[in-house]
Amino acid sequence: MIIRNNPFDSTLYALDLIGERQKALSCNLANMDTPNYRRKDISFSQYLGGTSNPLETALAAKMGPSPVMFESTENKKVNPAEELSEMQKNSLLFTVAARRMTSLINEMKTVINMGNG
């Protein structure tokens, strides 16, 4: 498990992982008609589950057990509706993480401006 003490690092890491999951979901849609294609996904709760940050805890609960792209063991076709739904959920998680980063940057600006006064 990776525990990041710096809120910038942990939020950036979450954004990176969400981006990787979006790539996996896009790959599934692109290959949905490919014979014998197995659905791919990324889950990463082992990297985020042990932290005290609420954003990371929420992401860990949503994303699953490991940060590695894995292939489904099921041999069924990719369901475009399910993939699009997962992409929408992932997009919402990205928005939350991006807002968290914006908040952190604004906090840092405030500290800098107070130090200059």
Image (spheres, grey):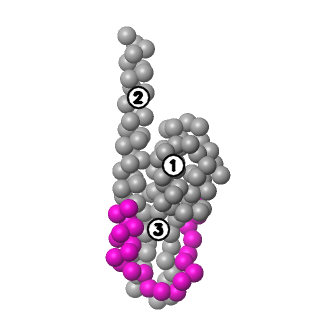
Give the number of the disc on residue 24: 3
SS at circle 1: helix
Quadrant location of the C terminus in the rendered image:
top left
Place residue 28 in its image quadrant: bottom left
Q: Residues within 10 Å of mark 2 (few under 14, many from 20)?
A: few
Q: Amino acid at mark 3?
A: Ala
Place residue 67 in its image quadrant: bottom right
Instruction: State whether residue 35 appears in this view.
Output: yes
Which comes sooner in the sequence, label 3 or label 2? 3
Residue lying furthest bottom in this view?
35
Confirm or deny contact between disc 3 and disc 2 (CB under 8 A): no
Q: Residues within 10 Å of mark 1 (few under 14, many from 20)?
A: many
Residue 26, percent from left and from top: 40, 69
CA–CA distance between discs 1 and 3? 20 Å
Residue 22: in magenta span: no
Q: Residues within 10 Å of mark 3 (few under 14, many from 20)?
A: many
Residue 55, percent from left and from top: 47, 47
Which comes sooner in the sequence, label 1 or label 3? 3
Query: Which residue corresponds to mark 1?
Result: 56
SS at circle 3: helix
Residue 57, percent from left and from top: 52, 50
Q: Is residue 82 above or below residue 96?
A: below
Give the number of the disc on residue 107: 2
**Which is closer to the viewer, label 1 or label 2?**
1
At x 48%, y 86%, the residue is: 76
**Which is closer to the viewer, label 1 or label 3?**
1
Query: For the magenta stretch, what is the residue range?
Result: 67-89
Q: How many marks?
A: 3
Q: In the picture provided, is 1 more to the left or to the right than 20? A: right
